[in-house]
Image (cartoon, rainbow, N blue to C red):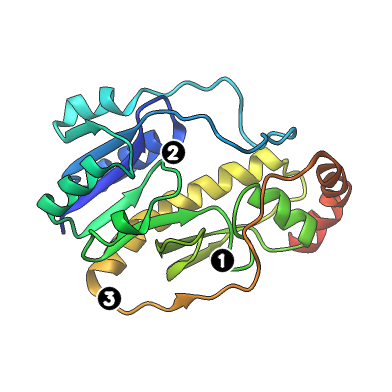
Amino acid sequence: MKICLFTYSFEHKKSYEYLCRLLFEGVKINYIFAANKIKLGFKKSEINVTVNGLKYPKIKTLNNVHKIKYLNIQHNSEKLKKILKKEKFDLGIIAGARIINKSVIDKFKIGILNIHRGLLPENRGLDTIKWAVLKNLKQGVTAHLINEKIDLGLMILKKKIKIFQDDSLIDINERLQNAELELLIKSIYKLKSKKNFVKINAKNKPQSTMTKNLEKKMLKKFEKYKKKNG
């Protein structure tokens, strides 16, 4: 299977951890396409679910050791489309990317794999941990082959995580990240052996960043949520 990785060029936890796990598991990566940071159009949430101040090596630093082809390039660029057409990849893996256009997705024989931090189709979009608490949804991750719509496509695998009574939002996020890495490897092996996957259908729209007022409501529900879902 010929595989390429979509990552960020700057320090990024997901890009770093995905590449490390793939290399550890012996998955051959033929090419890395690393995009620069861009200014995002949505407001950042006030309540953080990640640990601040952590440092990770840039992908290029790690890549130099393992001699994988590397290119600093925007993921929806015409230049990348030409490369994809020439290279004829079976699978792309998202380890750091914004929305990828259909014209890029269609260049892959199997498709582009994404691991979404939320159980699809109910929990789409941003701030999925918080929305799960507010709406009393289970916490988990979903592996899927993407299409042009946000967090839809073809279902590969799902995994729910445990919730403990002393959990913080950061604890839940770390456990979700761990589940992502587990599904990443399982999904690749499943894609090698199976070609027909169920389409993800959703009536709900993808969620945006949670507002300050909704975050307050979410925090008030958090202790009850843990008791009910633990």
List x then y, in percent, for residue 205.
64, 63
> Alpha-carbon distance for marks 2 and 1?
20 Å
Element carrying mark 2:
helix
Q: CA distance from mark 3 to mark 1?
A: 20 Å
Residue at position x 61%, y 29% from top? 51
SS class, disc 1: loop
Mark found first going from the N terminus, 2 or 1: 2
Q: Which mark is residue 194?
A: 3
* Residue kind at label 1, given as amino acid type: Leu
Residue 14: which disc? 2
Query: Local crowd at mark 3 within 10 Å, few (<14), some, or many (≥20)?
Result: few
Residue 102 visible, this angle: yes
**Mark 2 neighbour class, 10 Å CA radius: few under 14, some 14 to 19, many 20 or more:** some
- Which quadrant would the C terminus be assigned to in this image? bottom right
Q: Amino acid at mark 2?
A: Lys
Real-space CA distance between mark 2 and mark 3, rounded to the nearest whole angstrom: 26 Å
Measuring from the top left, give residue 9's x and y in whole percent. Answer: 35, 28
For the residue pair 57 and 102, the one nearer the viewer reads as 102
Residue at 24 percent of width and 39 percent of height: 32
| Residue that carries the numbered disc 1 in the rendered image | 120
Q: Looking at the image, which residue sits at the far front? A: 78
7, above or below 225, in the image: above
Kindly report which numbered mark, 3 or 1, lies closer to the viewer in this rendering. 1
Amino acid carrying mark 3 in the image = Lys
Which residue corresponds to the image point at 41% horizontal and 42% vertical from the top-left? 97
Q: Indicate the secondary structure of the residue bearing disc 3.
A: loop
| Viewer-side residue, 159 vs 89 | 89
| Residue 66 placement, left or right of 61 | left
Q: Position of residue 11 (x, y in %)?
A: 42, 25
Q: Quadrant of residue 43?
A: top right
